[in-house]
């Protein structure tokens, strides 16, 4: 693909300089004149009735400007984001259902005064019995958290092929229970929201979510205003992932306080509040049963997931389904039964956190692949390859596979790791483990999952991309800049982005359920840039008195082909146009040709392209301490086409590091509904010493549907990590840990039990 | 015109509520985190060489973060706004040319510290002789202010017809000298500029000019950045008129200080600085010669203007020309000689201030019309009517008159004032005076004088007007909202405006040289709204399964004609569209079909339509004190069509009140180059007791080229005021004052001289 000047080249991040020099402005950096500071009084109990809230003393404290409770709201449930039931209020109504839930809020001249006022609010509770384990919660007689049967917020059950027959045909049946824990996103920038109400009544929120258009849409009911009366402005994003995804409380609280005081109001979580209130990754218990012939052919699979919603639902029902679907496409097993329940517990509500519910189930399925290989005496590499999905397949759940580099990914990481040698001749206490995954490039949860973009040619010849697609750290803006610059033959520094402002940008759904930016927005920006280019050429042709087909574009200029003396700069063309009418703006819309996610059927082609990944981990286990050291890690990803290879590598490395944390150390720990490690001392995340140098391989399969052949990258690479590590540990010391995180304690216990 | 729901109806200002409740945010209200405050050291001498500037002591003052002088700039002259020569620097280079000129600037943690630091800057001057009177300045041997001959920055000389012959044919020749003084715009909000440089290097200015697109374009050289690296955001505008028009110093100063300190920098003028530094209305000396036959037919006119540019030029050369042109079209005199010189003096630079250089000359021409009438014994009303331009005329300077309500205007005010009775039977010391004027609806100074607008249909069915046209108090946004709402059959409250941000809005030239908003932007918004309507109807037709011709729009809904049960709301259509691709956005571009202003020829049709006005003032003069009391004032304006009558009336009243100040009391007084009345105690503006209730008449001629027949309104009504008052004073007590303002002192002196 040597034809491209920028696409496919490793380039530095367009937002890099600002960020590394500390000059980038984040949501937490926003200050407005006369801004007040809000603090929230949170429930001390995991489950209780609220009998009375007395705010009178707090209101009297000098510096306090307003105190609000549920009585100040319109008492309507905040609308869930398109999926699942609505069950939450911005401030608790009658009951609290987890420790940390919002009961009242204070706006004061400074944070300390607001904090002090919280201590003056008297809440009378009537404690209720809580339930914290999802398997306890679905038992008859368990405490009822919401008005639903068995505390189940959503369930699904489907069967493809004939599972009973599949198991009958099997020579062996494997059955096991796996569990994935509560993991906190650990975003560096805490949740922040600032509300400022203009004289016209229009409210502007400055915040750090990544789905402002949806957010605006669902907020209008809680605020009681029309959608266009809400404007959301975003600064650089210092994290978040899914942590703030379904929580509108900060918006409603800031809005009500701003309205009550006539001043802007800022709310920001403390780190502790992030741990106890921002959402954490959805825990799952996975019951997995697999039927297999002696030769390794998979004949049937039954996956049953019990997912924890926490006290309020959100994306859980969607994530649970997504996980069930995505793990079903990787191998060619045609008899599959998928069951899932999302269950309420008196713990913090849960959220997506990279790969949208799929890493959990992948840990189970890819662990079991190794159990099967072990039992059958087949190399795990061969077992996987034998069953692997290929290009051209329509998977059992209906995914149409346009391109598939799974085998190449497997071979790259196996070769790098010296797989055959190391499996053949094991070093004591060392082991290698493999795992694979498949993901999607986008997912049609609703009508429009496409993207709309504009490319405006500025009067100095630079261009501005006008798109609501958000840079949340994945390098999206760099990739989109490369695409636009490529199509207009401009250097990368000639591209800028509009600020993210819902009043200005075209509607965008945000990267729900995956990383749709490269595929959908990449297409949209490419089309917009091409449209802008055509408009520039048409205008230049008129100025130069030639046909636009006789022109070529290079180095910020348009030349008459074969007569380099005759040229005009893009700047001149743009400036000329603007002084005679509208600016030159190219428009691009792309909506992939896919079906809407089959909410009950779990069947269909919901994405236009599917990335694949394969990974090999090498570990050393200390049999004395149970400590696992990751010696080496190879991660290959079939991303279709690497538009910015260095960024794709970084993305892959990030996914691996993040998931090493999940696999080996991270866990939000509860004692009777209270988080006992809500800080970075007690909650351990991977540090440099916990992570090896990661070797990444970018496999380019040039997907027929991707822009320049690109699919997606970031999500696919975290899915196999935990299983690769669990498999490597098993290979090293012969024990299999089925509950994450694989702590030294668990390893040691398993080693002791095996003795 | 009963067909309209909103156009032609008096409606409250869309920005009214915010403004009267004090919630509207102005430039001076902007505060940014870590913002520094700038103060400027200004020249104490009207003309001096700068030998040395020592800032070392100032830099040492605690709290001072940066001090800059011309050495910190790129030493390039700031570019004049499309007309005239460039002659100014953001900070004085080598020489200062007026008291108040910028020499150095300080940024400090607060204003007081910055102010204190100014006192520590040592400037060594070498005083030079100054010249303050333009007629002195053009004399040989006068002090040379710039490197131009005779201190003339620009001159023009044209002749139409045969002026010598015209004077030869005249029975009488009238010759006189008139003078119009320095008048300060007295805008309530002082000049403010805040610069904030982002991590990307892009600078955002928050300020209160009304021509941000031009400003951005001319700023790029002084800042040494590309145009798209500059963004200008405007809040509500609390005044300004032309006061800040050509002055880029605050921008360059704030930018350089922000760059040097890495922090946002705010600069705001004190009231005194406004008087000595913000520009004032251009004074003119007018030598006028008119030839006339016994029957009152004008045979020739020779206008010679000496206009004061002040220390630096700006819009002066354009204003001087505009004045010469506009006064030549009102009457049918075919032999006209126009001469003008713009002259440098060591006084504050000058600016346009309502009606762009035309009120000055109108004072002369309309005073002389009464001198002629008096001499010939013809009623001034009849003399004017006899010579008046009519619809269908092409005037001596090439204006093509599509509609002309001059006669109707004259009759309205004469009838109201009881003109004939009062002229016939005079009350002692009371008098009535008439004057007329003609202006333009826009003026093509450069290529594009049109307007581009978008109307975006929001997902809740409201609409947003995306236009760079600025609301600077004239009610533009209300009129444009009426037009957009009219075309989409929406209530006025369903319309909102984009914030003024050069990054977001289409290029707009700003209301240069007149009030082009109603005509050009009115057309553009109308076209955009119609386009949006068509798009909504097309989409609705698809949804309802009918042809779009079978649909009608009403009350936020689209109905199938004849079947009111079948309907869909605009909100639903917009929301549906947005969730499938781009938002529904209508585009409108309007550029009137006129020529570019003939800079040297002063001939052509530079505007698409011409508004007219006629006024009668009634005064009482106290012969003991010379005090003039305005008893009554009638102002009629042919504005084509009053889109918002109450607003047009307000505009007219404002023009009259403002000009009563100019005519009777206001003057920026100099003593050897120093302003001696730089405050609202010593500089007198009209108060309620100085102004009678003003009777306005809106004459609707339905111009063929205006949107809904509208032309323009605000400018035309200030042009005749001073002459109407001077004529009334003459009618009252028989003395003619030819130099504004007509103070009691001047009246008394004239009365004494007549005795």
Image (cartoon, coloured by chain):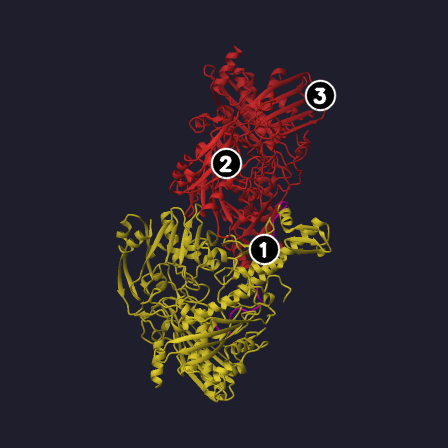
Chain colours: A red, B yellow
- In the structure shown, which secondary structural element does the residue marked by tag 1 occupy? strand
Q: Position of residue B642 (x, y in %)?
A: 56, 67
Q: Mark 3 Cα within 10 Å, few/some/many (few <14, many 20+)?
A: some
Q: Identify which residue, A176 or B126, lies in the foreground.
A: A176
- In the structure shown, which secondary structural element does the residue marked by tag 2 occupy? loop
Q: Chain of mark 3?
A: A
Image-quadrant location for residue A611: top right
Which of the image's four quarters has the N terminus of chain B? bottom right
Residue that mark 2 sits on? A240
Do circles 1 and 2 both sit on a common chain? no
Predominant secondary structure, magenta span: loop
Seen at 59% across and 70% down, the residue is: B703
Which of the image's four quarters has the C terminus of chain B? bottom left
Q: Any mark on residue A164, and which? A: 3
Q: Chain of mark 2?
A: A
Q: CA distance from mark 1 to mark 2?
A: 35 Å
- In the structure shown, which secondary structural element does the residue marked by tag 3 occupy? helix
Q: Mark 2 Cα within 10 Å, few/some/many (few <14, many 20+)?
A: many
Residue that mark 1 sits on? B455
Q: Position of residue B316 (x, y in %)?
A: 42, 69
């Amino acid at each position: 693909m040597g034809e491209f000047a920028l696409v496919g080249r490793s380039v530095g991040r367009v937002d890099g300089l600002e960020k590394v020099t500390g000059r980038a402005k984040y949501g937490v950096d926003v200050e407005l004149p006369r801004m007040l500071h809000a603090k929230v009084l949170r429930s001390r109990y995991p489950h209780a009735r609220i009998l009375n809230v007395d705010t009178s003393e707090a209101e009297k404290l000098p510096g306090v400007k307003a105190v609000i409770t549920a009585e100040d709201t319109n008492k309507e449930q905040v609308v869930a984001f398109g999926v699942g039931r609505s069950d939450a209020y911005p401030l608790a109504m009658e009951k609290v259902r987890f420790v940390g839930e919002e009961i009242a809020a204070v706006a004061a001249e400074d944070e300390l005064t607001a904090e002090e006022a919280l201590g003056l609010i008297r809440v009378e509770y009537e404690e209720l019995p809580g339930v914290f384990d999802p398997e306890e919660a679905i038992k008859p007689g368990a405490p009822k958290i919401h008005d639903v049967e068995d505390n189940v917020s959503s369930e699904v059950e489907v069967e493809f092929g004939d599972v009973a027959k599949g198991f009958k045909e099997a020579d062996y049946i494997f059955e096991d229970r796996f569990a994935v824990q509560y993991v906190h996103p650990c975003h560096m920038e805490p949740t922040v929201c600032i509300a400022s109400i203009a004289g016209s009544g229009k409210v502007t929120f400055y915040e750090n979510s990544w789905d402002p258009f949806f957010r605006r849409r669902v907020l209008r009911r809680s605020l009681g205003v029309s959608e266009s009366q809400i404007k959301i402005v975003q600064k650089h994003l210092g994290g978040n992932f899914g942590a703030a995804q379904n929580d509108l409380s900060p918006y409603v609280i800031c809005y009500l306080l701003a309205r009550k005081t006539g001043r802007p109001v800022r709310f920001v979580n403390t780190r502790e509040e992030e741990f106890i209130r921002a959402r954490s990754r959805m825990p799952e218990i996975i019951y997995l049963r697999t039927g297999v012939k002696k030769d390794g052919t998979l004949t049937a699979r039954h996956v049953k997931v019990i997912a924890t919603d926490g006290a309020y639902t959100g994306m859980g029902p969607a994530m649970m389904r997504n996980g069930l679907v995505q793990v079903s496409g990787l191998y060619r097993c045609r008899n599959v039964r998928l069951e899932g329940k999302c269950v309420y517990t008196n713990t913090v509500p849960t959220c997506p956190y990279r790969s949208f519910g799929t890493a959990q189930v992948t840990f189970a399925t890819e662990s079991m692949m190794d159990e099967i290989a072990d039992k059958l005496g087949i190399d795990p590499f061969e077992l996987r390859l034998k069953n692997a999905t290929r290009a051209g397949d329509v998977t059992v759940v209906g995914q149409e596979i346009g391109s598939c580099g799974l085998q190449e990914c497997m071979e790259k990481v196996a070769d790098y790791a010296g797989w055959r040698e190391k499996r053949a001749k094991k070093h004591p206490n060392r082991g290698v483990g493999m795992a694979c995954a498949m993901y999607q490039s986008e997912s049609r949860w609703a009508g429009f999952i496409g993207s709309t973009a504009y490319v405006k040619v500025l009067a100095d010849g630079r261009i501005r991309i006008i798109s609501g697609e958000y840079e949340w750290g994945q390098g999206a803006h760099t990739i989109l800049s490369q695409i636009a610059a490529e199509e207009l033959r401009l250097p990368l520094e000639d591209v800028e982005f509009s600020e993210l402002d819902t009043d200005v940008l075209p509607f965008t759904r945000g990267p729900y359920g995956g990383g749709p930016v490269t595929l959908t927005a990449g297409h949209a920006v490419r089309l917009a840039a091409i449209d802008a280019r055509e408009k520039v050429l048409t205008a230049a042709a008129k100025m130069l008195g030639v046909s636009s087909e006789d022109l070529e574009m290079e180095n910020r200029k348009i030349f008459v082909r074969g007569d380099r003396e005759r040229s005009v700069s893009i700047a001149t063309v743009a400036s000329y146009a603007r002084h005679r009418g509208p600016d030159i703006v190219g428009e691009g819309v792309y909506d992939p040709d896919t079906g809407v996610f089959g909410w009950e059927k779990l069947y269909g082609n919901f994405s236009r392209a599917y990335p694949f990944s394969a990974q090999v981990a090498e570990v050393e286990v200390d049999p004395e301490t149970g400590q696992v050291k990751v010696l080496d890690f190879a991660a290959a990803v079939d991303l279709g086409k690497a538009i910015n290879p260095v960024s794709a590598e970084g993305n892959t490395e990030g996914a691996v590091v993040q998931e090493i944390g999940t696999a080996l150390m991270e866990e939000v720990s509860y004692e009777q509904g209270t988080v006992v490690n809500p800080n970075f001392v007690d909650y351990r995340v991977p540090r440099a010493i916990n992570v090896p140098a990661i070797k990444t391989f970018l496999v380019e399969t040039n997907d027929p549907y991707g822009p320049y052949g690109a699919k997606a990258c970031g999500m696919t690479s975290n899915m196999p990590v935990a299983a690769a590590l669990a498999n490597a540990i098993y290979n090293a010391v012969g024990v299999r840990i089925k509950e994450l995180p694989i702590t030294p304690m668990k390893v040691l216990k398993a080693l002791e039990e095996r003795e």
